[in-house]
């Protein structure tokens, strides 16, 4: 297909496609004449991946380039390639808060306590240390109290993710699958955490479900039937 | 204190501080002479909050402005203010993937299934729908299989978050606490998910812990003692 069709197929503007080719994110089309190139399904797929990483994952063009390099690395131990992809998509924030050394120790202790096979200087560990140090700077150092709850939740999520990958991806597309799942999965996860917050704070601060633990979904038929907007919900008749 | 001291105290460059004042993120100092202003501890605190949101949370200046407006809204029901803060920090990606209507239905069904008190058109629900539609576009529509695992994990996280807020924040700083916890907590959560992935894929693809479910942390003393880097780990002697 020509570049115009590629654009229509993927919803990406032609100048943007040309930009991605210049930036090395998208392979050039096969030249069919001195100023015309032909694109195929592999370009459609790659372009969708690029847009997903940028639009939904919020990655920079530079980060996308690194991720795609990991995706395109032929051979190599699966675990190593996954590691490279992970590293590339874990941005370490520019800030260097004061409490960073202490926060790094907190992260290292958590990794040991959970028995995780992860290096203490993994980019994600560093990103986490920076975030914890920022909590500390903002007077909320006590946030470390919830880390084990977070870690247990993440173990469950990682188990579900790996099982999903195991069910659906053959080895060839394994890395792309993990990259997509990691980047877009982050977007799903943070959105879900927010929705769960909305639910929990509605129950706590609007007085619904008070006096009974709100753990576990769908526990309250009355609320389900009342609809999702707390301001319109009929209080449970229990 | 003068602006130079404010900068040293917070590690933020003076021109950047002036930029935040011009952009309305940071209140101007109290003028002590026609071209000199005085700043106090409230500026230090606010500046740290701004940097946390931008550096660690990855928020834009515009998003920070909205969040701070929610933080500064006096009175109002706690739940409403939290809602405003949530809305402001939930970016809805620019992309409009094809499968969006179906993805929206998936999200609405999930909210109903979990009995969550959250509106189906909440910005976080929309952000989640966009991410799910992007999965679909990339040939990974089956990702919806893991949504209930994610949702259960997020319920646990939200319970831990709300309990934390309940333990530590008085009403006055409640909103700031929730904003910080939401934005920086996202950074912690995505980093932890990545570390858990590293652990789980090391176990699965490097052959450690095979044949036994890897759920629950610290299950394997041998691995803990072996250190955190799978490539250096002594295989468990079990």
Image: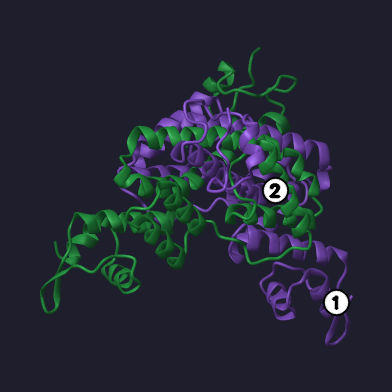
Chain colours: A green, B purple
Pick out the residue farthest to the top. A238
Answer with left or right where residue A192 lies relative to residue B6. Answer: left
Which chain letter goes with mark 2?
A
Residue A152 sits in quarter:
top right
Q: Is A113 or A49 nearer to us in this picture?
A: A113
Residue B32 is marked as none
Relative image position of residue B50 (x, y in whole percent)? 70, 63
In three-dimensional space, the C-alpha distance between marks 1 and 2, rounded to whole angstroms, equals 34 Å
> Would residue B80 be visible to someone looking at this image?
no
Q: Secondary structure at mark 1?
A: helix
Residue at image point 82% right, 66% down: B44
Q: Is residue A197 above or below residue A237?
A: below
Q: Determine the image quadrant of residue A195.
A: top right
Residue drawn at the location 54% of the way across and 46% of the way down: B194
Q: Which residue is mark 2?
A: A108
Q: As rendered, which of B89 and A156 lies closer to the eye?
A: A156
Residue B157 lies, in percent from the top left, at: 64, 35
- Secondary structure, mark 2, is helix
Q: Which residue is located at x 74 percent, y 59 percent? A: A100
Which residue corresponds to mark 1? Answer: B5
- The quarter in which the C terminus of chain B is drawn is top right
Name the residue furthest front: B237
Subunit ID for the residue under disc 1:
B
Identity of the residue furthest to the left in this view: A33
- Tell me the quadrant of the picture where the N terminus of chain B can be found: bottom right
């Amino acid at each position: 297909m020509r570049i115009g069709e590629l654009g229509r197929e993927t919803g990406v503007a032609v100048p943007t496609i040309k930009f991605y080719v210049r930036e090395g994110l998208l392979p050039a089309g096969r030249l069919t004449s001195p100023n015309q190139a032909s694109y195929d399904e592999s370009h459609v797929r790659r372009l969708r991946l690029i847009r997903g990483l940028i639009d939904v994952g919020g990655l920079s063009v530079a980060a996308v380039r690194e991720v795609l390099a990991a995706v395109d690395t032929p051979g190599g131990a699966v675990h190593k390639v996954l590691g490279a992809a992970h590293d590339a998509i874990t941005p370490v924030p520019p800030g260097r808060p004061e409490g960073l050394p202490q926060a790094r120790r907190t992260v290292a202790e958590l990794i040991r306590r959970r028995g995780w096979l992860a290096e203490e200087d993994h980019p994600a560990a560093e990103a986490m240390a920076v975030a914890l140090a920022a909590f500390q700077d903002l007077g909320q150092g006590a946030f470390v109290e919830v880390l084990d709850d977070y870690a247990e939740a993440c173990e469950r999520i990682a188990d579900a993710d790996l099982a999903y990958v195991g069910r659906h991806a053959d080895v060839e597309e394994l890395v792309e699958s993990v990259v997509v799942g990691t980047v877009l999965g982050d977007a799903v996860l943070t959105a879900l955490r927010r929705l769960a917050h909305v639910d929990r704070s509605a129950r706590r601060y609007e007085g619904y479900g008070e006096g009974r633990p709100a753990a576990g979904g769908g526990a309250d038929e009355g609320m389900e039937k009342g609809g999702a907007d707390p301001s319109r919900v009929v209080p449970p008749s229990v």
